[in-house]
Amino acid sequence: MSTVSGRISVSTRGTRNSQLSEQDNPPVSGVPRSISRQNSADADAEDVGEDDLCPVCRLLLYKPVTTTCNHTLCNYCMAQWASVSLAAPMTIVDVDEQPAEFDAVSELQARCPMCRTMTTAAPNPVLAQTLKEKYPITSHERAAEAQAEGDGLGGDSIQTVTVYIGNRHDWIAPKPDSPRNQHEWTFFVRPSRTDIIEEVHIFLHPTFRQNHVVKQRPPYQISRLGWGVFTITASVVLKAGYSWVSDDAQDSPDGAAKGVLPLEWMLDFDGFDGKGSMGRCRLKVKNDRGWEGISDEEERDQREWGRMVRQYERDGRYEP
């Protein structure tokens, strides 16, 4: 767990799972094994120049991106490096900031794997076209391998999502029968991608009559009236086929590996002139879906059945 300003503790340690480290530049994990070998005699005949090799994976640059410090890498290699070199993995922000999609290459500031300066990167389409023309055989094989691996070289199997966790707060005049209850708050979890979220389990202080609330559809939030602050835990459950890339991830109720990620938030009644605050987290999700043949309707039916079974097991009733 990592703590910021004494108010938020979020499970972001999963960034240490990667094969990369800032002490060396080994080949990036996730690059298909097939591209680490010489592919064919024709490809070997194309003598790829040193300047056209990715400094991380040591292969022909694929979907090259160039950093602000003027170093060029494969898009996937830079995305993987950035994911384990986060300059600010979680930031306290205004509760009115809207969730947004996140690009781990162009939007994330990280230390360059070559010179260690803080940098961002942008696609280099001119270089990409030049390399295709200069090394047609090798470029074709790189593209074919990426497609065969589900475009893993493009980094699509592991994506960085933005998750906001926090609370909105309003002060209200106390009532005669409850003079201490002066704080009306709404706790929420706002992911940039709700399409991969199965449900969110919210755990309140044990003194609450209903201290375990399950939200199966957005918005994932609850509102309460109280007098003090305490830590709320929210377990975010991913849909089948997705898993959290985090040391803190847990197996889901149906047995899916690393399908649940617990997040913690200390209620904030003072931030941003008393309206509350939230933490913006950059988290990694892996797509392990191996059942593309199942239709959308069948997938919805399976998810609904799973919800019904879990809710009956939990409290003996089902609320769609």
Image (spheres, rainbow, N blue to C red):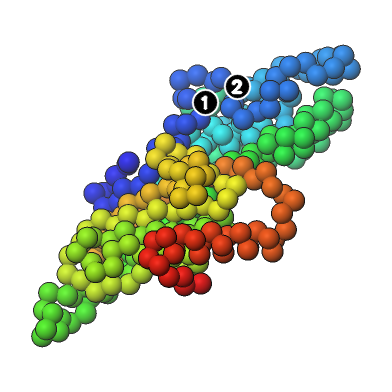
Asked if labels 1 and 2 touch by Cβ distance under 8 angstroms, the answer is yes
Where residue 168 sits: x, y (%)? 33, 68
Question: What residue type is disc 1 on?
Answer: Gln
Where residue 222 sits: x, y (%)? 36, 69
Residue 236 seen anywhere in this rendered image of the structure: yes
Depth check: 77 or 214 in front? 214
Q: Badge 1: how crowded within 10 Å, few (<14), some, or many (20+)?
A: some
The first of marks 2 and 1 along the sequence is 1
* Residue 93, above or below 171: above
Quadrant including the N terminus: top left
Report, in whole angstroms, how far the alpha carbon at label 2 lies from the one at label 1.
8 Å
Determine the residue positioned at 43% across, 70% down.
317
* Residue 42, above or below 231: above
Question: What residue type is disc 2 on?
Answer: Pro
Element class at badge 2: loop
In the image, which disc is placed on residue 19?
1
Where residue 32 sits: x, y (%)? 68, 27
Determine the residue positioned at 45% across, 43% down.
251
* Residue 50, above or below 200: above
Where residue 292 sits: x, y (%)? 72, 49
Left or right position of 147 against 180:
right
Element class at badge 1: loop
Left or right position of 265 against 173:
right
Pointer 2 residue: 27
Determine the residue positioned at 89% across, 17% down.
42
Determine the residue positioned at 46% across, 25% down.
22
